[in-house]
Image: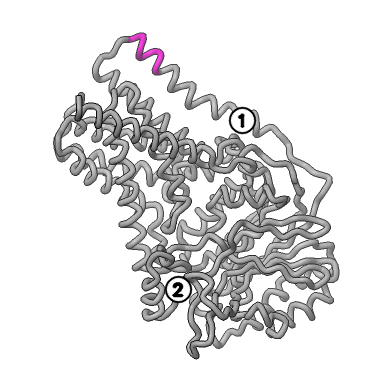
Amino acid sequence: MMVFSKLQRYGLSILSGLLLTLSFPYSGSITPLIFIAWIPLLLIENNLSEKKNSGFHLFIHAYLSFLIYNLGSTWWVSNSTMIGGVFAFIFNSLLMSLAFILYHYLRKRFSFSYSLFFFPIVWVAFEFCHFNWELSWPWLTMGNVFSDSPSWIQWYEYTGTLGGSLWVLLINSLFFKLLLGWKSECDKKIMLRLSVASGMVLVVPLVLSFCLMQTSYSSEKKMRILSVQPNIDPYNEKFSRQYTPEDQLAKFYGLIAPYKDKKIDLVMGPETMLSADIWEEYIDEFGVIKMMKNEKANWPNTEFLVGASTSNFFKEKVSPAAKPLENGKGYVENYNTSLFLSNSLEKTLIHKSKLVPGVEKIPFAAWFPFLESLALQNGGASGSLGIEKEPRVVATRERTLAPVICYESIYGEFIAAQCAKGAEVICIITNDGWWGDSPGYKQHFSLARLRAIENRRWVIRSANTGKSGFIDPKGEITQETAYWVPATIEQEVDLFSELTFYSKHGDYLGRFALFATCAILVINFIASIKRKFA
């Protein structure tokens, strides 16, 4: 066993955090570093594993690594909310540290020869759980690190991003074991087998990806889409009284006016493009809706998908997000909505389901209702929004679309469920201007490339301030806009109805890892009971 001084351990902690950061897109983008980024932290765990107080000391070292990773990769979150950003950095680092400590706990209770491979299982289980709870923040999922290297991970159509996480963690585990074997002068035959296994795990997915990259994707069914980037400042214009929702809509129509005589099947506008608070029951009475219906005469064969802020009235409290009216006569539920306007002027409203914790959703409000009240007392800006009960799609006689609003685009299984319901193209509407000119909007655009590969669908993004763009089923960018400039781009895309393995089965790797982790814990518990009464 390699022995490190306290100072050396802290140096290794910092090194792991830096390697994780530098490997992540647009916080370094040196992707190959991810295959060795965990080794310094694993060395610390191995060094401390025999000590009685190893858990506490390991937690400190792990927390330092993960805090560097969170700060280095997602510091831009604080541009929109300093308090929310600080909370995200501190709490997400804590969760990562606890997951690593769980691996340490299990590793100490089983033979090292195979318990090392508990690490990938436990971590993938953690990432899966982080997709599916009240404080979900899966931005830093290990598999996301390859979003800017689509030629490496074409096999995501079978595994999703958790397959990428498993790949990263397995390689780190194998390289770590090779390092230990080399330091301890392990048997040459064992080292050779371990070297071959490490090489195979690294190279085979790359070769498979290269082969899949040769596949061409085309369909007889096509549509021409116009993606609009109005570039309206979310801080000083979008929600100000001086720049009305009608003014903003007029800018939108001004940007698409040059395309009026072309054959355009769909025009996309960004998240909350209709910034007026639209009551859904009386939607046709609002000025922006009347304006859209009037303008539709100039676009008789073109449908529209845009973002809107909407509300519904209820006589009773139907969810934790329903807020009492001031007069006490009922409740109002607010939504972040995608609004689809068909050629027959029918409107389909789909509410955002995956909400940003702390900004669009007060976590655990269903269990602790007073948290919603606290948010209202603090100004109401962070009160929870209403959501859809399940993923929905927009279906017309000609085509089926997956409307995806902002944060939803980082949830692979959510979009896979939309594709399983018939979506032939993925339409992301977002407003990334909250973060300024930072890695945030670049990372968000990059993560959309994973959704294209997982489902083998075209992805079209309409972002208020950029980047907007078109991404093909291989995750390759065919068009993208510059940041913070008004823009309109068009492209004909193919529509696909075939389902990938991942579209059908979602995050099955996460479910398996969670089951395996629980099984290991149960086995350990039973073994502990037997030892106690032996």
Q: Relative to 76, is 428 on the left or the right?
A: right
- Label 2 is placed on what type of residue? Gly
Kindly identify the residue that appears in the image at 60 percent across and 40 percent down. Answer: 505
**Picture quarter with the N terminus:** top left
Q: Is residue 443 above or below residue 486?
A: above
| Residue under numbered circle 1 | 210
Q: x, y percentage for residue 116? A: 33, 28
Quadrant in which the C terminus is drawn:
top left
Q: Residue at x 39, y 39 (%)?
A: 123
Residue drawn at point x = 65 percent, y = 60 percent: 403
Residue 383 badge: 2
Describe the element under mark 2 as helix, strand or loop: loop
- What are the residue bounds of the magenta stretch? 188-194
| Dot 1 crowding, Cα within 10 Å, few <14, some 14–19, many 20+ | some
Indicate whether 403 appears above or below 159: below
The kind of secondary structure the magenta stretch mainly shows is helix
